Image (cartoon, rainbow, N blue to C red):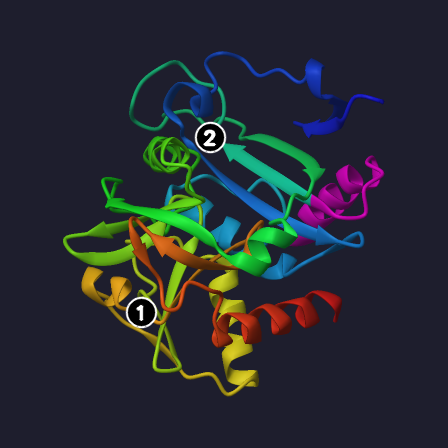
Amino acid sequence: MNEPLVYLNGEMTPLSEAKIPVLDRGFIFGDGIYEVIPVYQRKMFRADQHLARLFRSLAAISITNPHSKEEWLALIAKVMAAHEEDDQMVYLQVTRGVAKRAHAFPKDEVTPTVFIMTNPIVLPTAAARENGVACVSMEDKRWLRCEIKSISLLGNVLAAQNAAENDAAESIQFRDGYLTEASASNVWIVKDGVLMGPPKDNLILEGIRYGLIEELCAANNIRLEARRITREEVFAADEVMLSSATKEVLAVVKLDDAVVGNGKPGVVYHQLYAAYQEAKAA
């Protein structure tokens, strides 16, 4: 099999030959932004929304956006075309660039580092779809700017490791007794047919699926509430769901030692999953 090709600072190169200087601020400080775009049948899914979030995150930490929307789309298409898979997961990363190590932004202008790669998309198994997954709960110990899609992901890494050590699909996090999100997913609950999610503020990353679920609920007459949700409400929910680019929508049937609802994926989950697949095919 040929080695995957990636884009790095203007060049397409084999992955093993892609290199950055050790003084790149992404390497030294995690000073950068990333984005992940799913691709189905060689068509990017909700690319406009993903790029808009990339642009917001870059602006939030004062990194000059190195490309226009049209240029980004052309670069992504170039990387996609270099791979044979029809369904892919495109990863974009922009760091502030290379500069002498100092915590504050460089005084002199530096050129951002731009990296793009793609891998075959890996979605939940048929068994996970049919039976749901188990999660564990933990306190959210991350920083307070979670709305920025930063490459500084140590808090998320530790949450994901907590899930792995407990044979769980995800760690569902709470801050001061209120639901925030999982390590790499938004979290939703259902009670009495009403879908609820945490508000879109600085305590969660507004997943692109968040906006999609709002649209799917409106189209399918599912009542949706965005508000602060207590830990007690999560454990008393009829349904719990995860959403992300790779999970799409996924039912949680066990949280810690507690069974969620009747222990099976629920009615609202099935509605949203079916609607999600229709959106992908549109």
The one nearer the camera, 222 or 7, is 222
Residue 10 makes an appearance in the image: no
How packed mark 2 is, by other alpha carbons closer than 10 Å (few <14, some 14-19, many 20 or more), is: many
Q: What span is in magenta?
A: 69-88
Q: Is residue 252 left or right of residue 42?
A: left
Magenta residue check for 273? no
In the picture of the structure, the residue carrying the numbered disc 1 is 237
Q: Is residue 84 left or right of residue 158?
A: right
The correct choice, above or below, for 274 with respect to 93 in the image is below
* Residue sitting at the far left: 176
**Residue type at mark 2?**
Arg
Identify the mark nearer the N-term, 2 or 1: 2
For the residues labelled 2 and 1, the Cα–Cα distance comes to 43 Å
In the rendered image, residue 54, in percent from the top left (x then y), is placed at 52, 49
**Residue type at mark 1?**
Ala
Residue at the image position 38 percent from the left and 42 percent from the top: 61
The one nearer the camera, 152 or 113, is 152
Quarter of the figure that contains the N terminus: top right
Quarter of the figure that contains the C terminus: bottom right
In the picture of the structure, the residue carrying the numbered disc 2 is 96
Q: Main secondary structure of the magenta part?
A: helix
Q: Is residue 188 left or right of residue 220?
A: left
